[in-house]
Amino acid sequence: MGGLTQKNVVENENNGSNMAETMLRLVPMALCVVALVIMLKDSQTNNFGSLSYSDLGTFRYLVHANGICAAYSLLSAIISALPRPTTLPRAWTFFLLDQVLTYIILAAGAASTEVVYLGYKGDTAVTWSETCGSFGGFCRKATASVSITFIVSLCYVGISLLSSYRLFSKYDAPVVGHYNNKGGVEISTY
């Protein structure tokens, strides 16, 4: 191997995986910003009135969720790019935050999909008429933003799998059943 020690090989592998993880964390940041900007600029005025993303609470939630996810993605990419060894608290923090952000962005996408569906199809049972016939440009932008948000959700699923793999493959599970049994009572452990 000509000068490469085992330590150098491990460091090179860690640098490569850190770079890959950093890139994987930056992709959803860029997508979140794109989805956020599309939705922020989503408004239309015509003879029937005006419609903006801020008129619908679900779309406001989508904007906030994309903003939070973009900020977290940037912060986590910076932290994962630092050449520090992964510690147990750091691994748990990434694991838990990745899980939470995955569900936040998935919920935003799912709720917004329902609103877009109602915009296109309406719901006669609750007298909600379709609005996309009158506000087609608004609906196309909303559909694009929601579609990008679902791509972000898939990225976060991948990130969550990566952080869970890193946590549970590097560190042993917590030991359950080690009790200081001084009373002489048998306690079975599972």
Image: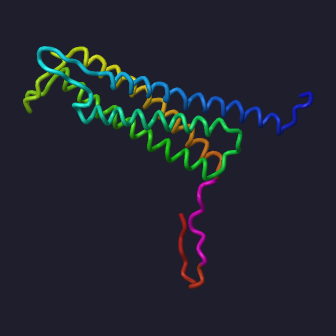
- Asked if residue 128 is positioned above or below residue 103 in the image, the reply reads above
**Residue 106 falls within the magenta-colored stretch:** no
The location of residue 115, given as percent across then percent down, is 23, 29
Residue 136 occupies quadrant: top left
Task: Name the residue at 59% across, 79% down.
Answer: 181
Q: Is residue 22 left or right of residue 55?
A: right
Q: How many marks?
A: 0
Report if residue 15 is visible in the image: yes
The location of residue 30, given as percent across then percent down, is 49, 25
Q: Quadrant of the N terminus?
A: top right
Residue sitting nearer the eye, 90 or 141: 141
Residue sitting nearer the eye, 174 or 119: 119
Residue 124 occupies quadrant: top left
Residue sitting nearer the eye, 127 or 61: 61
Q: Which residues are magenta?
A: 172-180
Report if residue 133 is visible in the image: no
Q: Is residue 39 left or right of residue 163?
A: left
Q: Is residue 134 left or right of residue 103?
A: left
**Residue 177 falls within the magenta-colored stretch:** yes
Q: Main secondary structure of the magenta part?
A: loop
